[in-house]
Image (cartoon, rainbow, N blue to C red):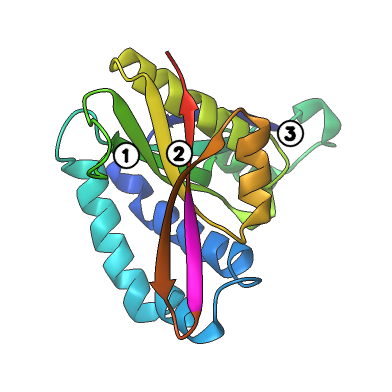
């Protein structure tokens, strides 16, 4: 069994957050990003860079409106389901009981695009679920927590940038009420890769 939830990221989550990002990118982006650039984005050198960036984002955010959230699962064991255990088994079970695992992450901040008002529009910068933990509601919980925080901060709209060929995430966000607002980016990754901006009203 597992108890699930979303909370603010802590310093001791940095390694898990970085690992979740790398695994989610390798799995989720392999269908539409060129292999070379994706390897550069997720290789050992890049992983060190991302770890430093996440450490700064989690421990020294630029403002109180910059946040990193994590989805977690906590092991909850049904002790009645276990036969009698020896001392070693009891210690092992006690160590597992309540152990928490980061299985997804989301980050948000005031919007930075020049056509948006950062006092009324927030941006979801990151939205990822570990590929081994998809379809367990973590994405919905992260999205709802992001909306709750930004609404409390007084924002009326949220935007996020998504790869145009990332149909899994596009479909999920569109089913949650997000829509393409017409803005797009084109990135040269050896071939053209397009991103679209989605928005949703939370007022």
Please state the horizontal and vertical placement of residue 187, each as a whole percent of the image.
40, 71
Find numbered disc 2 in the image and state the secondary structure of the residue it sits on: strand
In this rendering, position of residue 27 left or right of residue 126: right
Task: Specify the label residue 1 is tagged with.
Answer: 3
Residue that carries the numbered disc 1 in the rendered image? 10
Give the Cα separation between the discs numbered 3 and 1: 24 Å
Find numbered disc 1 in the image and state the secondary structure of the residue it sits on: loop
User: In the picture, which quadrant includes the N terminus?
Assistant: top right
Is 144 rendered above or below residue 89? above
Find numbered disc 3 in the image and state the secondary structure of the residue it sits on: loop
Tell me where the magenta segment starts and ends, as one range: 192-196
The number of callouts visible is 3
Give the Cα separation between the discs numbered 1 and 2: 9 Å
User: In the picture, which quadrant includes the C terminus?
Assistant: top left
In this rendering, the label closer to the viewer, 1 or 2: 2
State yes or no: residue 111 in magenta: no
Mark 1: give few (<14), some (14-19) or many (20+) Cα within 10 Å. some
Give the Cα separation between the discs numbered 2 and 3: 19 Å
Q: Which residue is at a point 37% across and 71% down the rendered structure image?
A: 47
Callout 1–callout 2 Cβ contact below 8 Å: no
Mark 1 or mark 2, which has the lower sequence index? 1
State the image quarter where residue 160 is shown: top left
**Front residue (pair 78, 88):** 78
Mark 2: give few (<14), some (14-19) or many (20+) Cα within 10 Å. many
Please state the horizontal and vertical placement of residue 8, each as a whole percent of the image.
36, 32
Q: Main secondary structure of the magenta part?
A: strand
State yes or no: residue 195 in magenta: yes
Is 34 rendered above or below residue 49? below
State the image quarter where residue 18 is shown: bottom left
Residue that carries the numbered disc 2 in the rendered image? 70
Please state the horizontal and vertical placement of residue 175, each as a whole percent of the image.
68, 33
Q: Which residue is at a point 61% across and 58% down the rendered structure image?
A: 166
């Amino acid at each position: 069994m597992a108890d699930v939830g979303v909370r603010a990221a802590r310093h001791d989550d940095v390694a898990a957050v970085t690992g979740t990002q790398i695994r989610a990118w390798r799995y989720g982006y392999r269908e539409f990003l060129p292999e070379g650039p994706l390897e550069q984005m997720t290789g050992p050198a890049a992983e060190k860079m991302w770890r430093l960036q996440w450490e700064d984002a989690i421990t020294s955010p630029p403002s109180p409106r910059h946040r990193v959230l994590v989805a977690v699962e906590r092991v909850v064991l049904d002790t009645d389901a276990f036969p009698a255990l020896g001392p070693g088994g009891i210690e092992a079970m006690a160590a597992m009981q309540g152990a928490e695992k980061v299985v997804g992450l989301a980050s948000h901040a005031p919007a930075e695009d020049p056509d948006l008002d950062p006092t009324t529009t927030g941006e979801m910068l990151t939205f990822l679920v570990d590929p081994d933990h998809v379809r367990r509601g973590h994405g919905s919980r992260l999205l709802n927590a992001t909306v709750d925080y930004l609404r409390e901060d007084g924002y009326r709209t949220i935007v996020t940038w998504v790869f145009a060929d990332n149909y899994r995430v596009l479909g999920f966000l569109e089913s949650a009420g997000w829509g393409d607002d017409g803005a797009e980016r084109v990135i040269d990754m050896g071939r053209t890769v397009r991103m679209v901006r989605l928005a949703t009203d939370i007022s």
